[in-house]
Image (cartoon, helix red, strand yellow):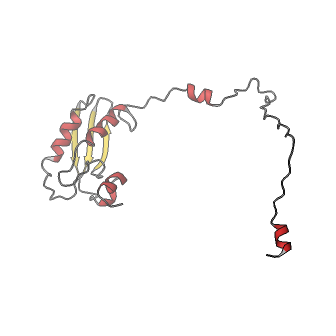
Amino acid sequence: MTEVNREERKILVEEVEGVETPPKARVEEAAGSGARQRDYLDGFLAQKPADMPRGEPGGSLYDAIIDALKEIYDPEIPVNIYDLGLVYGVDVTEDGHAVVTMTLTTPHCPVAESMPGEVELRVGAVPGVGDAQVNLVWDPPWDPQKMSDEAKLELGML
């Protein structure tokens, strides 16, 4: 290295006795708005959650039905029927009548006769459900794209 390069690479150190503390940030009162809430979360945290209708997504009865469907497994595939995408819809009326619209992987599925009955029994056993009905449909046909990401991961498809 040349003498000029060594001079350029030196680090200069400056020693100081102390540093003046910077002023703290202040929230000024907005002119004409009266008292300002200092913590905007106070109002948010004090709010009560909106009551969801029991039979709508997010409602207690709807969620209980979905949980019951997630306990039913396809005998050939180690994934529940809800995550497999076999359940196309769940409708719940105000008086607790539940209608599950679903399909099977194929019309020749070995459980084509027993699966709708099992779904009807499990959904009918959910507290709050007065009557359960299963509509088995073939249109649109089931395909692996209807599976949830969890099901695809379980089956090694992701």
Residue 137: x and y in percent read 23, 52
Q: Nearer the viewer, residue 22 or 41?
A: 22
Q: Nearer the viewer, residue 21 or 148?
A: 21
Task: Look at 81% across and 60% down and name the residue there.
Answer: 11
Q: Classify residue 126 as left or right of residue 33.
A: left
Q: Quadrant of residue 67?
A: top left
Q: Quadrant of residue 62?
A: top left
**Whether residue 74 is situated above or below residue 58 in the rendered picture:** below
Task: Look at 61% across and 27% down and name the residue there.
Answer: 43
Residue 87: x and y in percent read 28, 48
Which quadrant of the rendered structure holds the C terminus? Answer: bottom left
Q: Nearer the viewer, residue 74 or 5?
A: 5
Going by the picture, which residue comes out furthest to the bottom? 2
Q: Classify residue 115 as left or right of residue 6.
A: left
Q: Nearer the viewer, residue 128 or 75?
A: 75
Residue 48: x and y in percent read 51, 26
Which quadrant of the rendered structure holds the N terminus? Answer: bottom right
Residue 157: x and y in percent read 32, 61
Q: Quadrant of residue 65?
A: top left
**Whether residue 110 is situated above or below residue 50 in the rendered picture:** below
